[in-house]
């Protein structure tokens, strides 16, 4: 007997409904944010816009963005449960964020690709800053 899986839906994150699943998505991807859920909740509450990909009642993907509401947006933390990766969910999460911050208005759009994720962003049509003769600088403890 084959099991019919519910369709994937992208909706704005609702911490009352989705927070436990979101922590699990970070944990399943070995991201340290999951070790400090209170701090993660603060990060999401203070983000400008957060979305989840839901399959039935369960959130299986998450992404968030921070914006000044006028020119600039920083896209952060795009994650999909390992068992749900490579099914087009990451692409839909990024699309939902980009739709919220259209290029005509938000012409400064930035994200930092984790190691191994560059190919994903290239597939989505994003371009490394070096292609424009620009240099991005970062200050981080992970060097
Ligand atoms: C990166 C991540 C969000 C991609 O999500 P996903 O749902 O697996 O991606 P999609 O299925 O939507 O892939 C979209 C396209 O990118 C490609 N792609 C996905 N991950 C890729 C990767 N790591 N390298 C190269 N290409 C990749 C897919 O093959 C697909 O290509 P297609 O257009 O030819 O079909 C997911 O792998 C993930 O959660 N990784 C761990 C957390 C992480 O590193 N996040 C990135 C933070 S910067």
Image (tube, rainbow, N blue to C red):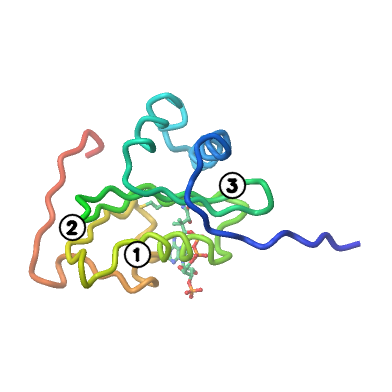
Tell me the mark number nearer the camera, choosing from 3 and 2. Answer: 2
Tell me the mark number nearer the camera, choosing from 2 and 1. Answer: 2
Label 1 crowd bin: few (<14), some (14–19), many (20+), radius 10 Å:
some
Q: Is residue 52 above or below residue 35?
A: below
**Closest to the observer, 9 or 118:** 9
Q: Which badge, 2 or 1, is on the more N-terminal residue?
A: 2
Mark 1 within 8 Å of ligand 1, using the beta carbon: no
Q: What residue is shown with label 3?
A: 59
Q: Which mark is residue 32?
A: none
Q: Which residue occupies 46% across, 59% down?
A: 93
Q: How many marks?
A: 3
**Closest to the observer, 80 or 68:** 68
Q: Which badge, 3 or 2, is on the more N-terminal residue?
A: 3
Mark 3 element type? strand
Q: CA distance from mark 1 to mark 3?
A: 20 Å
Q: What residue is shown with label 2?
A: 70
Label 3 crowd bin: few (<14), some (14–19), many (20+), radius 10 Å:
many
- Name the quadrant of the N terminus: bottom right
- Name the quadrant of the C terminus: top left
Q: Is residue 13 left or right of residue 64?
A: right
Q: Position of residue 117 (x, y in %)?
A: 38, 58
Q: Position of residue 22 (x, y in %)?
A: 52, 40
Q: CA distance from mark 3 to mark 2?
A: 29 Å
Mark 2 element type? loop
Q: What residue is shown with label 1?
A: 98
Label 2 crowd bin: few (<14), some (14–19), many (20+), radius 10 Å:
few
Q: Which badge, 1 or 3, is on the more N-terminal residue?
A: 3
Q: Which residue occupies 37% across, 36% down?
A: 45
Mark 1 element type? helix
């Amino acid at each position: 007997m084959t099991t019919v899986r519910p369709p994937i839906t992208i909706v704005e994150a609702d911490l009352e409904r989705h927070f436990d699943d979101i922590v699990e998505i970070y944990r399943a991807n070995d991201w340290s944010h999951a070790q400090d859920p209170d701090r993660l909740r603060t990060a999401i509450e203070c983000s400008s816009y957060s979305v989840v990909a839901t399959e039935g009642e369960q959130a299986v993907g998450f992404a968030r963005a921070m914006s000044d509401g006028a020119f600039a947006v920083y896209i952060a933390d795009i994650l999909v449960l390992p068992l749900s990766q490579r099914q087009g969910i990451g692409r839909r999460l990024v699309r939902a964020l980009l739709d919220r911050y259209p290029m005509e208005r938000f012409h400064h759009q930035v994200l930092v690709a984790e190691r191994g994720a560059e190919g994903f962003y290239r597939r989505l049509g994003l371009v490394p800053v070096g292609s424009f003769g620009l240099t991005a600088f970062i200050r981080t403890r992970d060097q």
